[in-house]
Image (tube, rainbow, N blue to C red):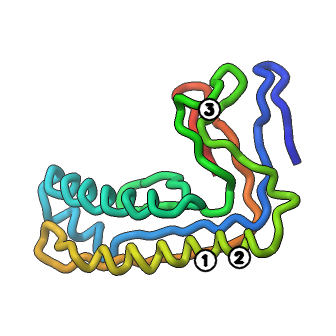
Amino acid sequence: CLRVNTAVGRTLAEYHTGVTILFSDIVGFTSMAQACFPHEVMAFLHELFIAFDDLVDIEDQLWKVETIGDAFMVASGLGSYQSESSVDTSRSTSAFRIESGMDRSRSMKTSAAYAAVKFGKRILEESREYEMPNGEACQIRVGVHTGDVASGVVGSRMPRYCL
């Protein structure tokens, strides 16, 4: 269901079927963050998430949704990404172009789920190469779910594209 905000002339939400979302977080992050200096925690997260970003870039179907604290969220099967320089921003609310999800084949949905699971395996392996600032080995949890989602730009102050 699409809703248009007539005051601003933009679509409030778009509906997507068969999208796979991957969530990950760091085991023991809260206790580690309490025991370490903030700059150590930030440096650790920066290095780890740069490695994760590089893994996102390997697969065309993946899109990094966001990071919140130690959580890293990726979507697969939404559409295709275009660089901001190639998008006409006068008619678009985001550099992320969504392709119609209503008519995608089952094989595309399976492929999107496979890409997310493969990424999850890769970040599990990658995280083993890191040590947290408190000296403990980095371990992450990964969860994946496939289903229907809605997306759109929310807010008026620093608006963001959200799933």
Q: Disc 2 on helix, strand or loop?
A: helix
| Front-lying residue, 44 or 39 | 44
Q: Is residue 60 left or right of residue 67?
A: right
Circle 3: residue type: Gly
Q: Which residue is mark 1?
A: 114
Residue lying at 77% horizontally and 28% vertically, measured from the top left: 10
Q: Earlier in the sequence, mark 3 or mark 1?
A: 1
Tag nearer the camera, 3 or 1: 1
Closer to us: 120 or 69:
120
Q: Which residue, given by chain and number where applicable, does mark 2 sit on?
A: 110
Distance (Cα) linking label 3 and label 2: 33 Å
Whole-percent x, y for residue 13 in the image: 77, 43
Is 131 on the left-hand or right-hand side of 9?
A: left
* Residue receiving disc 3: 155
Residue 80 horizontal/vertical position (percent)? 64, 50
- Of pointers 3 and 2, the one earlier in the residue sequence: 2
Q: At x 21% / y 72%, what residue is drawn?
A: 130
